[in-house]
Amino acid sequence: MLLKITLLPGDGIGPEVTDEAVRILETVAEVFGHQISLTRKDIGGAALVSSSNPLPNDTLKACVASGAVLLGAVGGPSFDGVAANMRPESGLLRLRRELAVFANLRPAVCFPALEDCSPLRAEVVRGTDILIVRELLGGIYFGEPRLIQGPNGQRSAIDTMHYSEPEIERIAHVAFELARARRRKVTSVDKANVLDCSRLWREVTSRVAMDYPDVQLSHMYVDSAAMALVARPAEFDVLLTENMFGDILSDQVGGIVGSLGMLASASVGGPVALYEPVHGSAPDIAGRGIANPLGAILSVAMLLRHSFRLEAEATSVEAAVADVLSAGHRTRDLAKPGQEPISTSQMGNFTAAAIKQRAKSVA
Ligand code: IPM
Ligand code: MG
C-alpha cells in the first residue's frame, strides 16, 4: 500500500517527536511491505517565520491532497505578542476547520508498566481506559462574535459559545458508535446547570441515545466530572464533551495516566483525518532531545488504523510501545528518582526495534 502523508512538525518539541513518529512509520512500512510518500510542510510559528501565515496555502493544499496528516505541535512564547488571527494556534484551528474534522478522539490508557508513574495511587489508575470524544469545530473556540472592544482601561472582551442541534447530533453519534466497540458506556459532560449550550447538548445527546439502546448514557457536570476522573478514572469508558471542556479534561486525563506525553489523538469526520499528540509544543524542554515521543508514535498507530485501515500495523505499534515500557525504558517525564531517563530518539529507536522484534517472532 502507498501511504501518502503530510507531515507538519510545527513548533517546540513538535519536530523532535515527529522525527520519531516518522522513524516508526518507516519501520512499519519496511516490516509490513508498504511505501510511504511523505510531504513536509510548515504550520504554526514555523510557518509564521517562513511565510507570515500560520497556515500557508501550500500547506493546506498538501494536507487536502494526502491520505492523512500528522502534526507535531504549534505555539510558543515568542508568538505571544502577535495578533489573534496570526497566532500559531489559529493556523491549527483553521486547519481543523478546513479539513472538517469535527470529532477529536483522545484515548487515555494506563499502561500496566506505568501504573506507578501516575500521581494517583496505582490501585486508582489501574485499568483506566478512557476515550475522550471531543467536539472540535464548535463551541467557544469558533463562536462569533469574538472581540476585545472599547477604550483602554474600559475595554471588554466577548467570546461566544455556540452549538446547533446538528453539530451535537453528529458528535454524539460518533461517541455512541465508538462505545459499541468498547464497554458500551457514554458519559456526556456538560454544564447544563448554567449554560444553555449545555442544556441543548444534554437534550440532543439523550435523544441520540435512544438509537443506541445497547449503550448506557449518563450525564455529568464538568466540575463533577473533573473530580470523578481523579477519584475513579477506571470507571469511565467513552467521555463525550464539547470543545473547550474536552481540551481541559484531556490534559487532566494525561496527568492521571502518568504523563501527558503519552496521549495521542485523531481528528476525524472529514475526507482527510489529522493526527497529533495531545501534549503541545512544550517550549520549556524544546530542542533538548528529552521529550517523550510516545504520544506522537501512538498517533501514528491511530493514523494507520483510521486512515488506512491497517489494523495489524496499528496493533504492532501499540504493542511495541507496551513492550518498551515493560522493559523499563523511560523518558524524563516518566522516570522516577534513581531511574536514568533516555532521550527522545532512544525511545523512538527502542520502539522501532520492538516492532521488528515482534515481526520476527511471528515469522
Ligand atoms: C489541543 C491544544 C489546542 C486546542 C491548541 C494548541 C489550539 O491545546 O489540541 O488540545 O486548544 O485545541
Ligand atoms: Mg489542549
Image: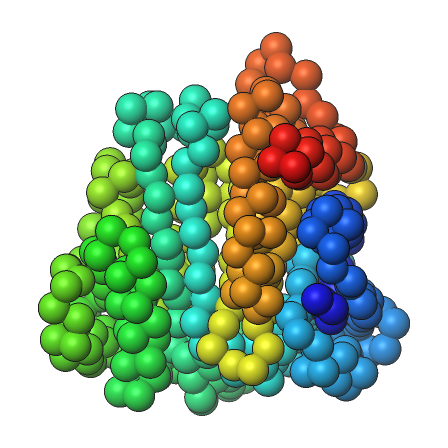
Of residues 272 and 356, the one nearer the viewer is 356
**Figure disc tally:** 0
- From what the image shows, is residue 230 above or below residue 197? above
Q: Position of residue 308 (x, y in %)?
A: 59, 67
Q: Identify which residue is drawn at 29% across, 75% down.
A: 173
Quadrant location of residue 201? bottom left
Of residues 169 and 359, the one nearer the viewer is 359
Quadrant location of residue 289? top right
Of residues 39 and 149, the one nearer the viewer is 39
Q: Is residue 113 left or right of residue 54?
A: left
Quadrant location of residue 38? bottom right
**What is the residue that sits farthest to the right in this orientation?**
50
Quick check: can you spot residue 178? yes
**What is the residue that sits farthest to the top in this orientation?**
338
Q: Is residue 175 left or right of residue 89?
A: left
Quick check: can you spot residue 223? no
Q: Position of residue 62 (x, y in %)?
A: 76, 79
- From what the image shows, is residue 71 above or below residue 202? above
Q: Identify which residue is drawn at 57% across, 60% down.
A: 310
Q: Position of residue 191 (x, y in %)?
A: 22, 66
